[in-house]
Amino acid sequence: MKMTFIGATHEVTGSCTYIEACGKHFLVDFGMEQGAEIFEKAVVPVPPNKIDFVLLTHAHIDHSGMLPLLYAGGFQGEIHATVPTANLCEIMLRDSAHIQEFEAEWRNRKGKRKGDEEFKPLYVMADAIGAISCFIHHKYEKWYSLHDGIEIRFTDAGHLLGAASIEIKITEDGETRKIVFSGDIGNSGQPLIRNPGYIQEADYAVIESTYGTRIHDRPTDYVTALAEILKRTFDRGGSVIIPSFAVGRTQELLYFFRQIKTDGLVDGHEDFPVYIDSPLAIEATNIFLRNRYWLQDAEAAEFIRNGINPIGFDGLITAVSELESREIKNDNRPKVIISASGMCEAGRIKHHLKHNIWKKENTVLFVGYQALNTAGRAILEGADKIKLFGEMIYIAAEIATLPGISGHADVNGLIKWISAIKPPKTVFVNHGDADTVEDFAGRLRDEFGLNTYAPYSGASFDLLTGEIINDAKPVYLIRKPQQDISPIYGDLVRASERLGKLIKTSSGRPNKELKDLTKKIMELCNKWE
């Protein structure tokens, strides 16, 4: 009975944990890295054809995106997930495969002129279709037996349609251990989906820590805050560009826009158009409507009972084809453009940024987490230029965030979730930036008396004895600055690390504060360079 941590260890994306028990080998999530990796990741200890099954917490690509690669390697087992998660993965994994194939084609087209070796995609559409065929559908709050000695139960995590925390009950050699994986814990008070569910007991808990040091600065209400951003942008003749996650966040925004339109909250611009320029987001929106009885949010349920589409309204325009996408820039009206990817790393949002981020009348509005080393994070943290399609583009647009709108619980929500469980033997903290993971684990230990462990990739644990088998150490892919023999230089390095930590935790601060901090840093650099 052994558990090994593979991904999202001292990092936010690429979730994956490997478990051996009862003669079976299985994974909890198998997600894709988003943004540059900081630490070297251990490989799954057995080949894909030896993995018996996968338990999937939810459909986001940083939890599900490597499943087609698993299938391509020979996996023929089952992928267990809730019904909506399986439905969403059907479109998301296909979309991911399409991106892989498109990128390979683009690289090879350029590479041929240079004589480069052929670039092969991570996986292709056939692999995505194969992985989709492996899904087994489950309901919330029901125990399922997967094998002699292995039972599982899904509980609503309140993060995304179908998202779940997963309880695993393992009985081996007469000994039973219960492990719970939080998955991504949702933010309370979100539209469309209900608040996170809670679990009462477990021997071991694996908890995410995305916002493990942050409290969401929640506005009085999202709709009013969003309407204010729209009003000031439209008044100066600009448009609002929203890099949004196609699944989950886009549908929440549509819910807000429907209310803004219904209540006439943008005075003088009541008929503004809202473009969804993401085929994936459009398909996901249809899945939300088909799975509306899983949403559970009381207000949304009331709309549905009264025959009202909670995420539809006049002025909503969908762009599916590339031609429809290109035509958006010819619409000179103040407008909203919602496009993916949410971290500005790929997809159509890059085109919209190229055409709009250099215009001071526009606003780029971030409505979700921006991982380290992503274009979205760079823009949010005050970059004055961004490279798009090989061209450096000046950033003149207003950069804004919608405070508190997050699919992830803040530190208080995380503490509430773990506190509901009768103190486990060990709490494993993962799925957070390196500093956040350590800080949150330390707080759980120091303030709440919990036995915590923040694993690095490759760390393994004996679930029967409660002992660490391999206390893996970090292997950096991005070099950390090394200290000189001079103690004064050492002080300088420590000061830079402190500044870096300040910057990493400042993404939710007001734009004025971010600009002031950026100005001071640039003045210091100009003085000493």
Image (tube, rainbow, N blue to C red):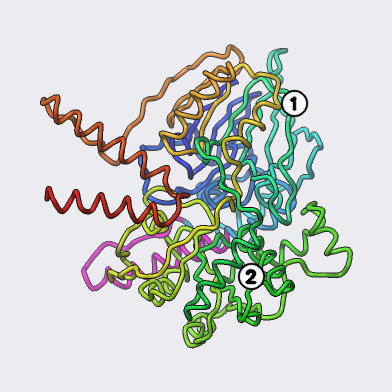
* 174 shown above or below 408: above
Q: Main secondary structure of the magenta part?
A: helix
* Residue 198, percent from left and from top: 73, 33
Question: Circle 1 — which element?
Answer: loop
Magenta region: 93-122
Q: Is residue 271 left or right of residue 482?
A: right
* Residue 32, percent from left and from top: 48, 49
Magenta run includes residue 117: yes
> In the figure, residue 49 lies in which quadrant?
top right
Foreground of the two, 441 or 20:
441
Magenta run includes residue 31: no
Q: Is residue 332 left or right of residue 206?
A: left
Q: Nearer the viewer, mark 1 or mark 2?
A: 1
Q: Residues within 10 Å of mark 2 (few under 14, many from 20)?
A: some
The residue to which callout 2 is attached is 282
* 83 shown above or below 179: below
State the CA–CA distance, disc 1 to disc 2.
37 Å
Question: Circle 2 — which element?
Answer: helix
Res. 200 mark: 1
| Amino acid at pointer 1 | Gln
Mark with earlier residue (1, 2):
1
Residue lying at 40% horizontally and 56% vertically, measured from the top left: 512
